[in-house]
Amino acid sequence: MQCKQCKGKLEVARSCRRLRMRCRKCGTEYQIHEVASELDNDTIAVLERYTVLIYD
């Protein structure tokens, strides 16, 4: 997945109570629902490891 701002690679960023997608290059964070339509198979496989996704 690519960042909408700088085209850097997005990775799953997990903190205590939330999951976000964070750009490795510029640090921009996206909520899962903001990029849900663009998820690739590798990212989906990572997200499937979590039992609950909360959209905040």
Image: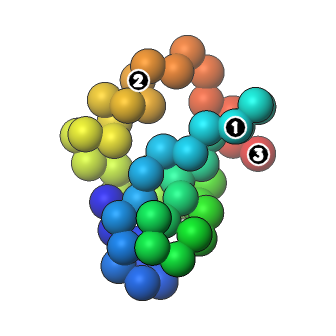
Task: Specify the label residue 3 is tagged with.
Answer: none
Earlier sequence position, callout 3 versus callout 2: 2
Which residue is nearer to you in this view: 24 or 36? 24
- Structural crowding at the residue carrying mark 3, measured as other residues with C-alpha within 10 Å and reported as few (<14), some (14–19) or many (≥20): few
What residue is at 55 percent from the left and 15 percent from the top?
A: 51
Image: 20 above or below 41 = below
- Structural crowding at the residue carrying mark 1, measured as other residues with C-alpha within 10 Å and reported as few (<14), some (14–19) or many (≥20): few
Amino acid bearing label 1: Ser
Amino acid bearing label 2: Glu
Which residue is nearer to you in this view: 51 or 12? 12
Amino acid bearing label 3: Asp
Q: Secondary structure at mark 2?
A: loop
Residue 49 in the image: x percent, y percent?
44, 19
**Residue on which the image places disc 2:** 48
Image: 38 above or below 48 = below
Residue 23 in the image: x percent, y percent?
48, 65
Between the C-alphas of marks 3 and 2, the distance is 18 Å
Q: Extreme top residue here?
A: 51
Residue 54 in the image: x percent, y percent?
69, 33
- Is mark 3 in CB contact (under 8 Å) with mark 2? no
**Residue on which the image places disc 1:** 15
The number of callouts visible is 3
What residue is at 59 percent from the left and 70 percent from the top?
A: 28
* Visible residue check, residue 9: yes
Residue 26 in the image: x percent, y percent?
52, 77
Please state, as top left, top right, bottom left or bottom right, where the N terminus lies in the image.
bottom left
**Residue on which the image places disc 3:** 56
Between the C-alphas of marks 1 and 3, the distance is 13 Å
Colouring convention used in this rendered image of the protein: rainbow
What residue is at 44 percent from the left and 31 percent from the top?
A: 47
